[in-house]
Image: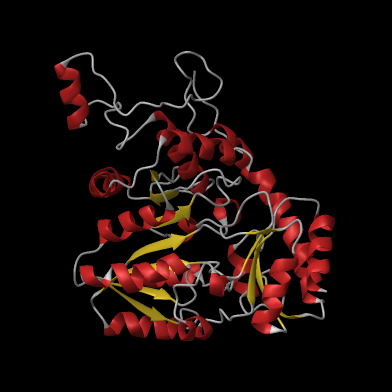
Amino acid sequence: MKQTPLTGFSSVCVHAGHEQDPHYAHLTPIYASSTYVYDSADQGMRRFSGQEDGYIYTRWDSPNFREAEQKIAALECFGLTGPGGGPLQAKAKLHASGMGALSTLFIGNLKSGDKIISHYSLYGGTDELFRKILPPLGIEAVIVDMHDINQTEAAIKADPSIRMMYLETPANPTLRCVDLEALIGLAHQYKLVSAVDNTFATAYLQQPFAYGADYVFHSTTKFLNGHGTAIGGVLIGTDVEKMNGPIEKVHRLLGANSNPFDAFLLTQGIKTMEVRMERHCHNAMEVAGFLDSHPAVARVNYLGLADHPDFTIASRQMKHAGAMMSFELKGGLEAGKRFIDRLQMCLRAVSLGTCDTLICHPASMTHYGVPKEMREKYEITDGLIRVSVGIEAVTDILNDLDQALQ
């Protein structure tokens, strides 16, 4: 019987990628097996040669990986049209962590002598990868202010070694946004590979493939999982042949594969993503308004506030401003420490995107490895507080913040 297309985002969250279990289990069971068997030598040869679809070894693939991968690819392509006029197709590869997925992205597309052009205020792990891990491999990052399209284009024209454009929008933790349409258009013009970190926004709020991005990346640990139960990362590409070929080979040989249990948890988490994101977004708007009017707060970085420098860009390319924000306390570092110590319900923790409200101090936590002068250049000051607004009753979030700010 022909499958009726799913027309709702939440339906894709729940049903995409699922195949009926041969034993009729409601959910795909956790396939806790390191390897898979064959009926014959000929079948084994067909599997290894790619002539027959099937599972070989869990470092390569498993039913749990495949369901999560197909679900995420379907969400990133939801409602988008491909070059031939039909639905856009993409391939996703699940990894053990976001950093594992980034490693596959960079090593799978770049060689010694190549460069990446990117912007300031990146996730601390990405920044350290650019500064400490890739340079010894002969791959360097060129960092420019990508809010200035002319400056960005001038940098690309001046250096033919630039092969990739890497964007993180909204950025961590300043919530700066860059213009996806303009920058990816520039990447196409100069034949650069374009990749976008969509962790903060998720496909619910923003779809980089709509602007022609070649790759989308997520730390699945965050909003996709949604419950803080498993580490993971995913790389999605629209060149399905390349994803199944060279990228697949790099993924397998780097050994940064996920595991069946974490993939199972991710799949269950994604099923509630739309309803979670709706509550996250509603609560965040309330929290941002509260902080913006509080006498102890010097500045709030939230894309839903009209005075944010990237409010117009975010309004154009995002469905909503999202659940992430940061703010600067007037008392600097000491005020920040007092605030963190006084929290009662909101949790003192790194990471983000869970049901709980998570609050961290980037200078001493997520961006500790970034030199102080570089942090301050990127507006990541000693007194900056980052908030991942959860789905608790918003009155309880506001009450906790209020008492901690006294």
Which residue is drawn at the image coordinates 47% and 71% (left, top)?
A: 122
Image location of residue 219, percent across then percent down: 48, 53
Name above or below for residue 3 compared with residue 133: above
Give the side of residue 362 with respect to residue 232, left or right: right
Q: Quadrant of residue 310?
A: bottom right
Quadrant where the C terminus sits is: bottom right
* Residue 58: quarter of image: top left
Q: Is residue 163 left or right of residue 179?
A: left
Horizontally, is 33 left or right of 37 in the view?
right
Q: Tally the numbered discs.
A: 0
Of 255 and 27, nearer the camera is: 255
Q: Nearer the viewer, residue 177 or 220?
A: 220
For the question of whether residue 381 can be seen, the reply is yes
Residue 85: x %, y % from top left: 43, 46
Image coordinates for residue 369, horizontal then vertical, percent: 44, 72
Q: Which residue lies at the image location 30% right of the left edge and 47% below the top edge?
A: 243
Colour pattern of the rendering: secondary structure
**Position in image of residue 7 (x %, y %):** 60, 38
Foreground of the two, 168 or 242: 168
Is residue 206 found left or right of 388 in the rendered image? left
- Residue 300 visible in the snapshot: no
Q: Is residue 158 above or below residue 240?
A: below
